[in-house]
Amino acid sequence: MAELVIGIPRIEEAVGRLGEELRELLSSYSSIALPLPKGLCRDLIYRGVGAVDEDLMDISLKYFNTSLARIWWPVIKEIPRLAIEMPHKEVACYEEDVDPRSLEANAYRLATLLIRARISISGRIDPRPWIEFFKPAKKIFPEIPNVRVIVADGYVKYKEILDLVEPKNARKLWKLIPTPLEILEMIAKGYLDEEYSVDAVRFSIRYLSDYVIGGKDLTDAYEKLLRDREYLDFLASTGVLED
């Protein structure tokens, strides 16, 4: 049984903090599962030990696009070091391997949705293609290893893992709220009613256009979202933060 589930937003600062805490977590709990591709962990341990940063990045780009590799770099670079320095501890990954080209294709699809919404002549929001985008290709949840600590990236995955493993303890490494895109994911998965879909798309357009594209990085975009009173009021209306 997992003793601890840790939730973090998918932003640079939170992942950086996780990278700094990995050694301490392993010292205290002996095993940890990360939301990274299984093959990436395997290659970092068996091919990355003793490798220079450039080689570690090359390994990472077999599984991630450039943006994700950059975000997860503080954790990626620690895995080979921990394999040497703490050989009796376990670092596992639980996400299935995905071709980076499919990640790029999804990013293109999302960008297309955003562009179409912004140039719409009618100004009306059709949430259906957005919900369709977030519908999972399969309903099978990733198999979580039998470890003592599980890290979940994103609000939705954090809640799903809490329900799945029922740990003794849970904590958030950073302020954790669902982004508008995650609200759409929750609607697509049936966790939330579709009555919230139009507003979820409207806030997603704002988040992507003004905060992500118009910001310095994902941390900057997320912090702007945390200060967006209108969005926080919308979240309160959905009730997702009450449990």
Image: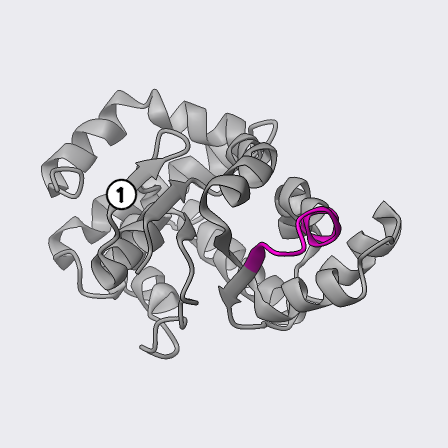
Residue 9 in view of the camera: yes
Task: Report the side of 124 relative to 81 (left or right).
Answer: left
**Residue 199 in picture, x, y percent from top left:** 23, 43
**Residue 213 in picture, x, y percent from top left:** 56, 36
Residue 123 in view of the camera: no
Q: How many marks overall?
A: 1
On whether residue 87 falls in the magenta region, the answer is: yes
Question: At x 11% / y 41%, what residue is drawn?
Answer: 239
Magenta residues (range): 79-91
Can you tell which quarter of the image residue 138 is in? bottom left
Q: Nearer the viewer, residue 203 or 81?
A: 81
Locate the C terminus by quadrant: top left
Dot 1 amino acid type: Asn
Locate the N terminus by quadrant: bottom left
Q: Could you say whether the residue bearing mark 1 is in a helix, strand or loop?
A: strand
Task: Report the side of 219 relative to 236 (left or right).
Answer: right
Residue ID for mark 1: 169
* Image vertical order of residue 229 relative to residue 207, above or below: above
Q: Nearer the viewer, residue 155 or 45?
A: 45
* Image vertical order of residue 93 relative to residue 66, above or below: below
* Image vertical order of residue 145 relative to residue 225, above or below: below
